[in-house]
Amino acid sequence: MEMKTIIYVLYFCLLINCKPNNQFLIKTNNDYLECKNKFPKRLVEYLPTKLTNTYCSYVCSEVVSRNDVGLKVNNYNVDISEIDSIATYLQSKSIAKYSSNDTCLLIVNRFETLDSYENREDIIIKDSVKIERDCYKNLYPVPNFIEFRNHSAKELNIGPDFDIYVLEAKSGNYFKEYNLKPNPQMPNNWKNGYSKGVALSREENTVIYWAIVW
C-alpha cells in the first residue's frame, strides 16, 4: 500500500498550563491518539497512552518518499525523580545504551537538516564516508532528532547530555504496508528497518520516546 507523503508536526502545551480538565489538552490527546492509531500496534504500543506533562510535543510522520515514518513524543520539564524511575526501568529493558556525545552513532537519516526537513528539500549527502563506517558494526540505529531543534550534538540534533536507550531495532522491511525503498542514507545492512527507544536528559529535564520505520 502506498502511503501519502504527508508530515504532521504539532507543538502544544508550551505556553499554557495543561491541566487535566483543559479542553485544549483533551483535544490534543485525541489528536495524539488519532496519530498513534495510524501506525501498526506492534510499533507504537510502548509509547505513552496519553500526554499528561505540562510541556510536551509530538511529531507524527508518514513521509514514505524520505524513509521518514513514525512517531516521536517529547516530554519537557520532567521531574528528576520521574526521569530516574524511567532510567531504572530502561536499564533492564533496553538492548543498548548510548550517549548523545558518543563519537560514533548509527543515525537514521543523518543527512537531514533543519532546512531540508522544514522545506522538504532534496537531501544532500555531503560526506558519503559516514554511510558505511567500521564502528557501526555492533550498533543499533537511533533517530535524527531534527524536530528537537538543538544542534549542540551535531547530526543527532539533541544536547550532548542525553542517555539513549534502544528498546528494539531490526533490519529489514518488517512493515510492508509502507512500501519503503532502500534508504540511501543508511549502511547496506540497515537500508530498511525499524527502531524503538527512549532518550532522556536530567540536565534538560526531558524525555523523548520514538518509534520509527525507514
Image (cartoon, rainbow, N blue to C red):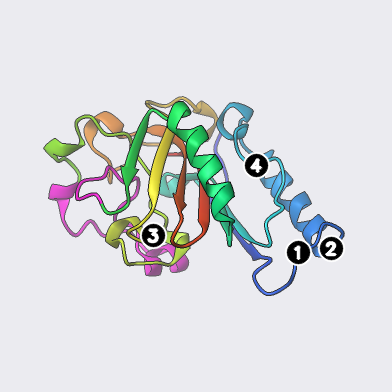
Q: CA distance from mark 4 to mark 1?
A: 16 Å
- Label 4 sits on a secondary structure element that is loop
Label placed on residue 139: none
For label 1, the crowd category at 10 Å Cα-Cα, with few meaning under 14, some 14 to 19 and many 20 or more, is many
Is residue 118 in the magenta section?
Answer: yes
Kindly identify which residue carries mark 3.
158
Give the Cα separation between the discs numbered 3 and 1: 25 Å
Given contact means CB atoms under 8 Å apart, are the residues at marks 2 and 1 in contact?
yes
Q: Which residue is mark 4?
A: 48
Q: Earlier in the sequence, mark 3 or mark 1?
A: 1
Q: 81 and 188: which one is in front?
A: 81
Q: Quadrant of residue 36?
A: top right
For the residue labelled by badge 2, is the local secondary structure a helix, a strand or a loop?
loop
- x and y, in percent, of residue 129 in the image: 12, 48
Q: In the image, what residue type sits under mark 3? A: Ile
Measure the alpha-carbon separation of dots 4 and 3.
21 Å
Q: Residue 146 in magenta?
A: no
Disc 2/disc 1 C-alpha distance (Å) = 6 Å
Question: How far, Cα to Cα, is label 2 from label 4?
Answer: 19 Å
Residues at marks 3 and 1 touching, judged by CB atoms closer than 8 Å? no
Find disc 1 in the rendering and name its residue. 18
User: Which badge, 2 or 3, is on the more N-terminal residue?
Assistant: 2
N-term-proximal mark, 4 vs 1: 1
Magenta extent: 102-130
Name, please, the residue furthest toward the front.
Answer: 81
Of the two numbered discs 4 and 3 on the same chain, state the one appearing first in sequence: 4
- Disc 2 designates what residue? 22
Residue at x-position 28% and y-position 46%: 185
Q: Left or right: where does residue 25 sit relative to residue 5?
A: right
